[in-house]
Amino acid sequence: MTRVCLLTATAVVAATAAIGATVTVATDFRQIVATSTVIVRGHVTDVRVIAPLSGGRSLSQVETVATVAVDATLKGSADTFISVRVPGGRVGNLNVITVDSPQLSAGEVAIFFLHAGADQALRPVGLSLGVYPVAMDPQTRQTAVTPPLAAGLTAAIGPVVHGDRARKLMTVTEFESLVRLVIAGQARMGPRGKS
């Protein structure tokens, strides 16, 4: 009986030691648009995981590379196909998970807000903040996305409330119009935010 209690106590201590918290900060949509080098709507045609071949493999170097067929370009320039990199992925029996990293899969349609890093690879701005999955709205039967947080445009100014019923799905056309509106507003304001 003492051994069972000791094993149970050890398991509880081990489980609670691994518990942590992740805090995410709401980022205004305008900032995501401004930070993006390229914004495209496209569909994922292939997903592969890459990892360093050296023996001193680092988990932070494991990345998933999605090939995206570009259906529309909203900002910047893009080829017919682009590669989008996100941290993490499965290598053999090892599954490397990065908090808030989007999980991309073949056949998925999304609007991607991408930034070219020092290595010129395109990665989503703010990880999952830079990927807006496109899905069928069950009520309207139109392709739609969850509206972004844009104070004064799609959300009230003030605290962000998870599950706010006032935030309705936007059609892809509405969403892309909003992106173009934000880009036009930023162009008028200039690089320092002054008109």
Image: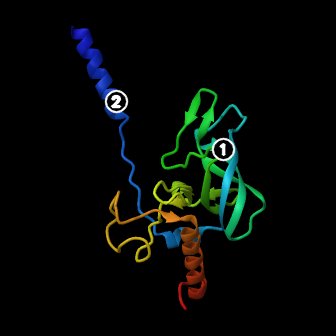
Query: Coloring scheme of the render?
Result: rainbow
**Residue 49 in view (yes/no):** yes
User: Measured from the top left, where is residue 195 in percent x and y?
Assistant: 55, 91
Instruction: Quickly name the residue at label 2.
Output: 15
User: Measured from the top left, where is residue 194 in percent x and y?
Assistant: 53, 89
Residue beneath the point at 52% across and 71% down: 31
Q: Residue furthest top?
A: 1
Q: Nearer the viewer, mark 1 or mark 2?
A: 1
Q: CA distance from mark 1 to mark 2?
A: 34 Å
Give the secondary structure at mark 1. loop
Residue beneath the point at 69% across and 65% down: 72
Q: Residue furthest left?
A: 1
The quarter holding residue 116 reads: bottom right
Give the secondary structure at mark 2. helix
- Residue type pointed to by label 1: Ala
Q: Residues within 10 Å of mark 2 (few under 14, many from 20)?
A: few
Q: Which mark is residue 106?
A: 1
- In the image, 55 versus 1, the foreground residue is 1
Residue beneath the point at 66% across and 68% down: 37
Q: Residue furthest front?
A: 140
- In the image, 51 versus 92, the foreground residue is 92
**Horizontal side of residue 77 vs 91, given as left or right:** right
- Residue type pointed to by label 2: Ala
- Nearest to N terminus: mark 1 or mark 2: 2
